[in-house]
Image: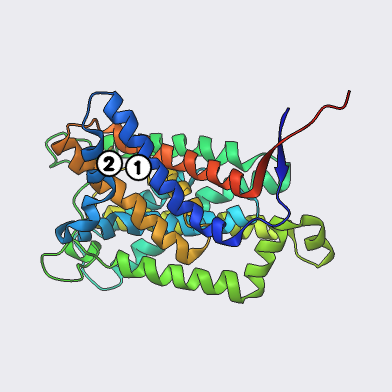
């Protein structure tokens, strides 16, 4: 009989190599699947995984798409390390954008350096407020944050639809469901004239560095790890699991909200019904691909951003459907988790004794 046996000491090298192995296996499986579906599978996989990195003109787009993924994944990773499973980052991302857009509409026609920071602060607070609901329900009522955070995502989507079709609808927008375009003082400045690269990209890198310092060099980071690995030891050590739950969910919500505001004030320049891009869900893959390490998450964010950019390329060159990007991302998560299981467990045979 086949049985799973836990390895005494999982290989550290394999733990860090498994994301690269997962990417390679995803490319191989994707080639086979799309070839079987009648597409040029090799060409499709090359366009999705390699072309965005081989063509320098695609790099600015990579950075723009990687920045929100990295910011959201950094917040999620803090919670995941503490066994707090915030699955609703997409809703917090949307609510951050809504809160920041509220400030933008209230200051429309004004100018000043303070407007964009106020929008960013509103975005952070909006995401934190939305994340505080599952935090309260988890701590006070022991309700699973997985369900509450996920369900709140759909509430946030409907709130967005209501606002852009109702009170925030642009009267000069030819009846399209959208807000007014943000002014120059309300949009992220470009790092170079005529470039897609905006201020959000270096901000995401700075946040990643700060998150690494907090998680690896401070007592707060140590508390998060202890609560996640050994709750009983954490209680004896004086660390409060409830405080860690609140802190991790608020951090995740705040970073997701900031990412949402940056996306609204960057590539979109307004709120539209198309704003929910799924970045909050994709960031879960980024967090695991980066091994819940802030510096590894930067790598994971770039890889997943490449699948977005490469998916757009493959739609033109190979005529792949738009859903192919999501399929590759889901396949990558599945293969990554499968390789993790094989790193931590080995397959053995249980011999029956007569």
Query: For the residue labelled by badge 1, is the local secondary structure a helix, a strand or a loop?
Result: helix
Query: For the residue labelled by badge 2, is the local secondary structure a helix, a strand or a loop?
Result: helix
Q: Which residue is mark 2?
A: 45
Residue 322 percent location from the top left of the image = 25, 33
Query: What residue sits 35% from the left and 53% below the top?
Result: 303
The quadrant the N terminus occupies is: top right
Query: What residue sits 55% from the left and 61% below the top?
Result: 13
Q: Is residue 122 left or right of residue 189?
A: right
* Whether label 2 touches label 1, CB < 8 Å: yes
Q: Which residue is mark 1?
A: 27
Q: Which of the two residues, 66 or 45, is positioned nearer the viewer here?
A: 45
Query: What residue sits 17% from the left and 63% below the top?
Result: 184
Q: Is residue 248 left or right of residue 107?
A: right
Residue 149 percent location from the top left of the image = 54, 41
Residue 191 percent location from the top left of the image = 20, 71
The quadrant in which residue 79 appears is: bottom right
The quadrant the C terminus occupies is: top right
């Amino acid at each position: 009989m086949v049985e799973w046996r836990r390895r005494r000491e999982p290989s550290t090298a394999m733990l860090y190599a498994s994301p690269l192995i997962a990417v390679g296996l995803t490319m191989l499986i994707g080639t086979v699947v799309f070839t079987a579906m009648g597409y040029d599978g090799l060409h499709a996989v090359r366009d999705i995984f390699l072309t965005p990195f081989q063509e320098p003109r695609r790099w600015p787009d990579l950075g723009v798409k990687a920045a929100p993924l990295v910011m959201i994944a950094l917040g999620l990773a803090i919670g995941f390390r503490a066994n707090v499973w915030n699955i609703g980052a997409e809703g917090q991302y949307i609510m951050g954008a809504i809160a920041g857009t509220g400030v933008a509409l209230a200051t429309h026609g004004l100018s000043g350096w303070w407007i964009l920071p106020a929008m960013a602060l509103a975005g952070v607070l909006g995401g934190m407020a939305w994340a505080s609901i599952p935090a309260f329900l988890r701590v006070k009522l022991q309700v699973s944050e997985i369900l509450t955070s996920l369900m709140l995502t759909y509430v946030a989507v409907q709130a967005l639809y209501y606002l852009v079709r109702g009170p925030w609808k642009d009267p000069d927008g030819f009846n399209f469901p959208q807000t007014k375009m943000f002014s120059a003082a309300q949009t992220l400045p470009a790092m170079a004239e005529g470039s897609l690269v905006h201020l959000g990209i270096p901000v995401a890198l700075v946040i990643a560095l700060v998150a690494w310092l907090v998680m690896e060099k401070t007592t707060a980071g140590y508390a998060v790890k202890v609560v996640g690995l050994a709750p009983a030891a954490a209680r004896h050590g004086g660390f409060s699991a409830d405080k860690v739950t609140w802190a991790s969910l608020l951090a995740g919500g705040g970073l997701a909200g900031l990412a949402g505001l940056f996306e609204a004030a960057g590539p979109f320049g307004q709120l539209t019904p198309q704003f929910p891009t799924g970045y909050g869900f994709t960031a879960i893959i980024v967090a695991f691909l980066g091994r819940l390490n802030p510096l590894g998450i930067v790598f994971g964010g770039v890889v997943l951003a490449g699948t977005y950019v490469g998916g757009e390329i493959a739609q033109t060159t190979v005529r792949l459907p738009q859903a192919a990007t999501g399929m590759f991302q889901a396949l990558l998560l599945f293969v990554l988790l499968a390789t993790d299981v094989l790193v931590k467990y080995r397959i053995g045979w249980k011999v029956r004794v007569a």
